[in-house]
Image: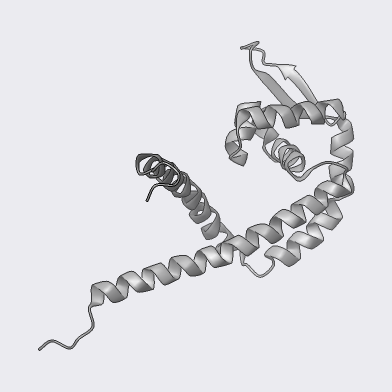
Amino acid sequence: MNTSPDTTSTSAIQGEQQRLRLVNALLPFLAVHTSIRDGYAAMVGISGPQYSVLLYIKHFSDKGAPCVKDVAEHLHLSASYITAEVGVLERKGLLVKTKDDSDQRVVRLALSERSKELLEGIQDVRSQVNNVQFGVLTPEELTVLAPIIERLIDSSREALTLQRYLATRNAKPHGSR
């Protein structure tokens, strides 16, 4: 009689426990980080998502002025949502929209002088807070962690698509068992 534990079952349980541990760590991190982002946004008088739009444009404009599609893809939000937020930011004088030279249908986004000043005005606070938040990680750990998180974002999108498909395929009318 074989009394050794089933290693396949043990391995599956350990894998599930590790995934649960990861999720239970990521969810509070995301909640706290979102609160920090919203705090920065409040300091400059805008919403958290609007702040994320401005930061994306600030940090990635060295590759050329981004368009709405670029911002939406990077932030993992819909283009229609970003279009609405860009409209608000433009009305507040924080963004400048220009037509693309080669394709007049494409609108390019740039920070206004006012938004550059606002972001610069909180840079010391951001540096201090970010140093505390991320100071527990070495530069090497940050270098390794970012691509792992990016892969998790991609696989999570695939998982969400699968979940939605399976939910509709297996959907039962309300009230039936």
* Residue 69 occupies quadrant: top right
Residue 65: tell me if it is visible.
no
Q: Position of residue 125 (x, y in %)?
A: 85, 57
Residue 81: tell me if it is visible.
yes
Q: Position of residue 36 (x, y in %)?
A: 76, 56
Q: Residue at x 72, y 28 (%)?
A: 84
* Residue 166 occupies quadrant: top left
- Residue closest to the far left: 1
Comparing 56 with 141, the one in front is 56
* Residue 13 occupies quadrant: bottom left
Residue 8, above or below 128: below
86 vs 165, left or right, is right
158 vs 77, left or right, is left
Comparing 152 with 17, the one in front is 17
Q: Residue at x 81, y 31 (%)?
A: 89
Q: Position of residue 3 (x, y in %)?
A: 17, 88
Comparing 177 with 3, the one in front is 177
Comparing 60 with 30, the one in front is 30
